[in-house]
């Protein structure tokens, strides 16, 4: 698609990608992957983050222009924290003007913005510039809460975007049923071919035996307390099976206390955040996702691409768009610890079924391939720029 699309333009198409920071996380990694893929397809990409004081976690290819906003005396981190209505209004106006100038100076043909509040901020800031904006939601905003005034502003400003991107048909249909005047398109996350084969050095935190792995922030939304409860009910039946939860977050102490209370210190491990968790998936035997809600979980895609049989809560709205229940994984009712433990036990004792699901799971590499997803992005870009 890209060659035909770019050949219709007499100049290289400039796209400025905007996100709050690149401090780590699925949305941030997805933004870097999107910017890199568009650059590979011949677009001129500028990557703009709102908070220059937050360091990048991800490596940005040199071919991508990296831009930060102009400094202000009190710092961008106080955007939402000013006291006094008049003073606050004057400062916000100044910052808005600076931000507008900084983005316009990148001379974009198109803006791609990531994540709810940033989307609203960018659309509002660029009103009147006639620069088309594609606003991308990265979570299920039916459940992902933001302050009420931002919800109201999203309803006001999203109709001004040339496109709104969500990640599942389920979420698109929910929006349409409410007659929101949004030009909405579904684009899932791509899955990249990654090296997840077992090497000679096994991570120290993986015990000898069979390993269940989960990946994510140690936060309430990830439901790791439910995963530990489910594992606790069957741990004694499977003495050679162990649970490892990769990630870091505010629930660490709570989860550690839970593990200690259930006498699972020798069976459950919280090694923290691993720089490249995909590199150790080859040592795992089963992947479990227990989120309360998702957008389009990269961790699930990557685990399946590595040939891990997945079990997931059938939460809104990503897992059921990825797992074909009974074919390449198992979906269980949300928050149902009993059914989760039953599904885990079934695959832990049945090597053949686990391997069958794992083989089918690898088909995500084709179903959500980078080429297929990027072709959709190029179609959306073409529509946004009114290029046939």
Image (cartoon, helix red, strand yellow):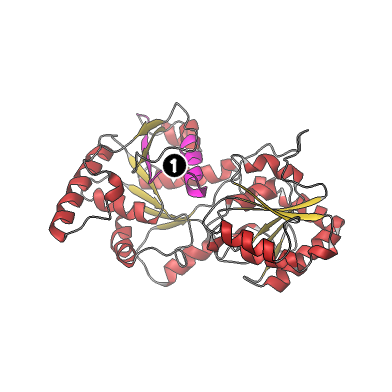
Residue 30 lies in the magenta stretch: yes
Quadrant in the picture for residue 319: bottom right
Count of picture labels: 1
Residue at point 75%, 56% (across, down):
267
Quadrant in the picture for residue 178: bottom left
Visible residue check, residue 63: yes
Vertical placement of residue 345 versus 109, above or below: below
Residue 170 lies in the magenta stretch: no
Visible residue check, residue 312: no
Residue at point 29%, 65% (across, down):
149
* Near-viewer residue (381 or 46): 46
Label 1 CA crowd tier, 10 Å (few <14, some 14–19, many 20+): many
Point out residue 282 in the picture as x, y percentages from the top left corner. Answer: 74, 43
- The C terminus - image quarter: top left
Q: Name the side, left or right, on which 254 lies relative to 312.
A: left
Point out residue 250 in the picture as x, y percentages from the top left corner. Answer: 51, 57
Give the magenta range.
11-36
**Of helix, strand and loop, which one carries label 1?**
loop
Point out residue 236 in the picture as x, y percentages from the top left corner. Answer: 82, 64
Residue at point 50%, 31% (across, down):
40
Q: Name the side, left or right, on which 42 lies relative to 255.
A: left
Q: Which residue is mark 1?
A: 22
Vertical placement of residue 20 versus 353, above or below: above
């Amino acid at each position: 698609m890209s060659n035909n699309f770019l050949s219709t333009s007499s100049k290289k198409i400039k796209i400025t990608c905007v996100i709050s920071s690149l401090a780590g996380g699925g949305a941030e990694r997805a933004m870097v992957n999107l910017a890199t893929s568009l650059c590979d397809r011949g677009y001129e990409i500028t990557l703009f983050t709102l908070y220059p004081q937050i360091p990048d976690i991800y490596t940005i290819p040199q071919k991508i222009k990296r831009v930060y906003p102009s400094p202000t005396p009190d710092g961008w981190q106080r955007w939402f924290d000013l006291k006094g209505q008049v003073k606050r209004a004057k400062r916000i106006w100044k910052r808005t003007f600076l931000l507008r100038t900084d983005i316009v100076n990148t001379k974009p043909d198109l803006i791609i913005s990531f994540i709810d509040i940033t989307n609203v901020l960018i659309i509002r800031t660029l009103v009147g510039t006639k620069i088309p904006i594609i606003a991308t939601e990265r979570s299920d905003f039916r459940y992902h809460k933001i302050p009420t005034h931002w919800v109201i502003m999203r309803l006001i400003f999203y109709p001004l975007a040339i496109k709104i991107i969500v990640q599942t048909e389920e979420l698109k249909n929910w929006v349409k049923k409410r007659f929101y005047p949004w030009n909405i398109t579904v684009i899932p996350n791509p899955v990249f071919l990654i090296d997840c084969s077992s090497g000679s050095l096994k991570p120290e935190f993986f015990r000898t035996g069979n390993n269940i792995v989960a990946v994510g922030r140690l936060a309430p939304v990830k439901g790791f307390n439910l995963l530990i409860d489910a594992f606790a009910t069957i741990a004694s039946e499977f003495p050679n099976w162990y649970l490892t939860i990769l990630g870091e977050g505010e629930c660490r102490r709570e989860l550690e206390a839970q593990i200690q209370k259930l006498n699972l210190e020798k069976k459950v491990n919280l090694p923290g955040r691993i720089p490249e968790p995909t590199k150790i998936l080859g040592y795992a035997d089963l992947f479990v996702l227990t989120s309360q809600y998702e957008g389009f979980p990269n961790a699930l895609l990557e685990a399946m691409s590595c040939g891990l049989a997945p079990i997931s809560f059938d939460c809104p709205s990503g897992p059921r768009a990825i797992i074909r229940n009974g074919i390449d994984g198992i979906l269980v009712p949300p928050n149902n610890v009993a059914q989760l433990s039953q599904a885990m036990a079934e695959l832990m004792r049945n090597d053949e079924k686990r391997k069958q699901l794992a083989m089918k799971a690898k088909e995500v590499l084709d179903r959500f391939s980078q080429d297929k997803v990027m072709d959709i992005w190029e179609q959306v870009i073409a529509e946004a720029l009114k290029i046939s």
